[in-house]
Image: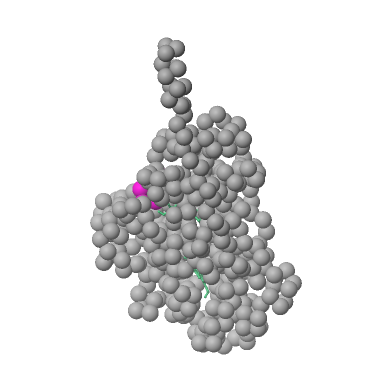
Amino acid sequence: MSIKKIAPTLVAAAVATALTACQAQETKTGSAAASGKSTAAKTAQAGPPPLAPLGPPPIPPDNKNTPEKVELGKILFFDARLGGDASTGCSTCHEPDQGWAWAEDFSRGYPGTVHWRNSQTIINSAYYGRNFWAGSVPSLEKQAPSAAKGGVAGNGENDIMEARLALIPEYRKRFMEVYGTEWPLIGDAWGAIAAFERTLVQRDTPLDKYLQGDKSALNEQQVKGMALFNGKAGCIQCHNGALASDQDYHNIGVPPNKRWEEDGLAQVTFRFEQYAKGQTEENYRKAKSDWGFYYRGKNKWDRGKFRTPSLRYTAYTAPYMHNGVFYTMEEVVDFYNRGGFDEDGRTTAFPENKSKLIRPLGLTDEEKEDLVAFLEAFSGEEILMEKPKMPAYAPLFTKAELEAAQEAK
Ligand code: HEC
Ligand code: HEC
């Protein structure tokens, strides 16, 4: 299809029609899905949901947000004692001044390890139906323990972490206030952290303002970039709706990170993850890249697919992609413009699964600049926060109390 030749006003509609057809094909994940013509025709009329202002995040009925719970969750988020050796807590890899993420391709890991994926921002994580790059957990409540206990993340142990909380009087007081329990329960700690994360949202970006009617919120170049986003560049097909994510899984051609070949520590984690995620022995040996969504259902057509990330707050979250291979938005746009290839011509290890929606775009240099300018409108002011004061340990009993108990025996 040659979208370049179509008049700009028609481009959006044309792209939506042609490409939603591909999208329908893709969600069925097999080439045989092309036969589903009638479904494709139906969805083609609707097109992808347009970009929209972001509303408040959903709050699960069984974990209501209260100011006391959010404050408790905040302290716990910054408390590295929720981890193995009390060095690596949530904020260690989700630093407020690094976009609530970690500004390297791979996240830092538990001491002695490096992670194998790029640290995701906490900002707006409350909107996703499933968390992580491959959507492996269904909620923030389930995400927190998997992070605190995961071998290359927090590497903590439930009983130890719970015992630490019990020996911190301020936590005992706060858990009692929020949950009415005499001793802090580790499961409640995850709930409080999730409640805190649901307050880390950004809904007042230039794009939100523009979509709410303030036409001065975007400059001329950004408005041109938005037309490209919705039209010629086709970004809207996956980065759509209020979150700028269809929350679906696609292989867009991101090449493997070279560190897996060159860096011993990265190799250790890479192999460990293949094993931990249940690869067969043969695949464990031959894997050279992150298989992404595959690990969940073990379907070969899911190799190399990852959840479409939101584009919100990305001004602060470089580097980009599940393995952080691109450090700037310009690189990302060049990658898409080449049809999912990096500057050395590298692409996904699973080209057979590469999305049909990813193809050379034919953007001019000026159009690429317009698009990058528009992408900046997905971010508002940087959200910064001081680390709260960490409450101290205290023994459960004084020496005198212990001696008195001894004598009473
Ligand atoms: C050692 C670094 C590290 C630590 C410690 C860590 N994280 Fe993460 N976090 C990551 C990485 C890397 C990812 C992406 C992992 C993946 O997709 O496999 C991530 C992903 C997430 C996500 C998913 C966001 C999304 O868009 O779906 C949330 C939420 C999150 N972390 C919260 C936490 C919380 C809460 C804690 C503490 C209990 C924590 N993290 C501890 C590195 C870390
Ligand atoms: C076929 C669906 C699809 C289309 C079309 C698409 N994207 Fe993406 N985008 C994704 C997926 C999936 C990822 C994550 C891929 C990965 O990590 O391997 C992603 C990642 C990104 C990221 C990195 C965000 C982060 O937090 O790391 C940016 C920026 C981005 N896309 C911008 C764009 C732009 C600009 C366009 C249009 C030129 C576009 N995308 C078109 C699906 C798509």
In the visual, does 244 lie left or right of 263? right
Picture colour scheme = one colour
Q: Is residue 151 magenta?
A: yes
- Using the image as rendered, state which of residue 87 and residue 244 is in the foreground: 87
Residue 408: horizontal and vertical position, in percent? 45, 12
> Relative to residue 336, is residue 110 depicted above or below?
above
* Residue at x 67% of width, y 59% of height: 55
Q: Outermost residue, top direction?
A: 409
Q: Is residue 86 visible?
A: yes
> Relative to residue 63, is residue 360 depicted above or below?
below
> Relative to residue 232, is residue 291 depicted above or below?
above
Residue 163: horizontal and vertical position, in percent? 44, 34
In magenta, the rendered stretch is 149-153
In the visual, does 55 lie left or right of 311? right
Q: Main secondary structure of the magenta part?
A: loop
* Residue at x 57% of width, y 79% of height: 373
Q: Outermost residue, right direction?
A: 213
Q: Is residue 20 visible?
A: no
* Residue at x 55% of width, y 48% of height: 74
Q: Is residue 302 magenta?
A: no
Residue 314: horizontal and vertical position, in percent? 53, 68
- Using the image as rendered, state which of residue 402 and residue 195 is in the foreground: 402
In the visual, does 61 lie left or right of 403? right
